[in-house]
Image: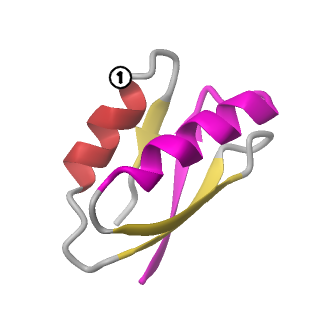
Amino acid sequence: MKTKVIIKGTHCASCKMLIEDVCKDIEGINSCNVNFQTGETEIDHANNLDWQKLKQEIESLGQYKLEINN
């Protein structure tokens, strides 16, 4: 299943790499592709993905805000 979300606060390739790396370690995520210019992020995931865990992990990095619209 693929879902698009917005991650506010991304502004460079390092942001993209950091977020994609963190997503690799979250159970249920198969892949993550961040467009750092727009914040639009496509996440390929299992149906039982823990969205709260994902939100916590990304926002714990500091400057990012995850907006989930599902």
Q: Secondary structure at mark 1?
A: loop
- Residue 13 image point, x, y percent: 79, 35
- Residue 56 image point, x, y percent: 28, 34
- Quarter of the image with the C terminus is bottom left
Q: How many callouts does the rendering have?
A: 1
- Quarter of the image with the N terminus is bottom left
Identity of the residue drawn at 59% across and 34% down: 18
- Residue 39 image point, x, y percent: 66, 43
Specify the segment rendered in magenta: 1-26
Q: Is residue 2 left or right of residue 34?
A: left
Identity of the residue drawn at 33% across and 35% down: 57
Between 5 and 57, the residue placed more toward the observer is 57
Identity of the residue drawn at 25% across and 80% down: 47
- In the image, residue 52 sits, relative to residue 4, either above or below, namely above
Identity of the residue drawn at 74% across and 50% down: 35
The crowd level at tag 1 (other Cα within 10 Å; few <14, some 14-19, many 20+) is: few
Quadrant assignment, res 17:
top right
Between 39 and 44, the residue placed more toward the observer is 44
Q: Say whether residue 33 is magenta.
A: no
Quadrant assignment, res 49:
bottom left
- Residue 21 image point, x, y percent: 54, 44
Q: Which residue is mark 1?
A: 60
